[in-house]
Amino acid sequence: DTCLESYWELIAKRFSNPTINDAITRICFGGASNQPKFIVPVVRDALKSGVKIDGLALVSAMWCRYCQGKTEAGKDILPNDPQWDRLQAVAKAASKDPTAWLRMTDVYGEVGEDDSFLQAFFNALNVIEANGVENAMLQYIQKSNKEQAMKDDNRDASPAAMRE
């Protein structure tokens, strides 16, 4: 299991290091072709196996927010995707109707029609819009840590654990 707080600290440290030239623009480049290759198959598998998809929906919601074309500070985000014009128009529409983003069938396919993914995406995008990306990440980490602690407590209280 990955400790999300430690991972968050590692990522924050990496992006604050001026000697590492890894930018959000590079990571987001080609998202319309990368999401169906790397994110959507994981979502599909998670949905089939009943695994929680909140973190995956958050990733898609953060990409959607990025594609709106303005940082939270109001600075323009320069086009950096071959499909930028379409992505930006759909991302802006998604701020009023989150289903618009998931209706990009070339990106999300049938995953975009799944009610549980749609709800998780809707929730994530709402948190981002209301509280910002960093706060949305922190809320997700805190919620995940709480859920993991409850799992650990339940496992420790199981009859098998008590016999040990």
Image (cartoon, helix red, strand yellow):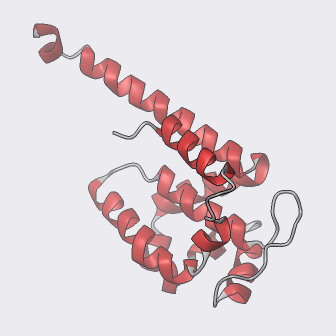
Taking the image as drawn, is residue 104 in sight? no
Tell me if 44 is positioned left or right of 102 in this view. left
The residue lying at 34 percent from left, 18 percent from top is: 153
Q: Report x, y in % for residue 148.
A: 40, 30
Most extreme residue toward the right is 74
Tell me if 30 is positioned left or right of 86 in this view. left
The residue lying at 71 percent from left, 65 percent from top is: 65
Taking the image as drawn, is residue 44 in sight? yes
Q: Report x, y in % for residue 89.
A: 75, 82
Q: Report x, y in % for residue 111.
A: 44, 71
Most extreme residue toward the front is 19
Up-down relation of residue 126 to residue 157 (above or below): below
The residue lying at 12 percent from left, 17 percent from top is: 160
Please tell me in which quadrant of the rendered image residue 85 appears: bottom right
Quadrant of the frame with the N terminus: top left
Please tell me in which quadrant of the rendered image residue 61 appears: bottom right
The residue lying at 82 percent from left, 57 percent from top is: 72
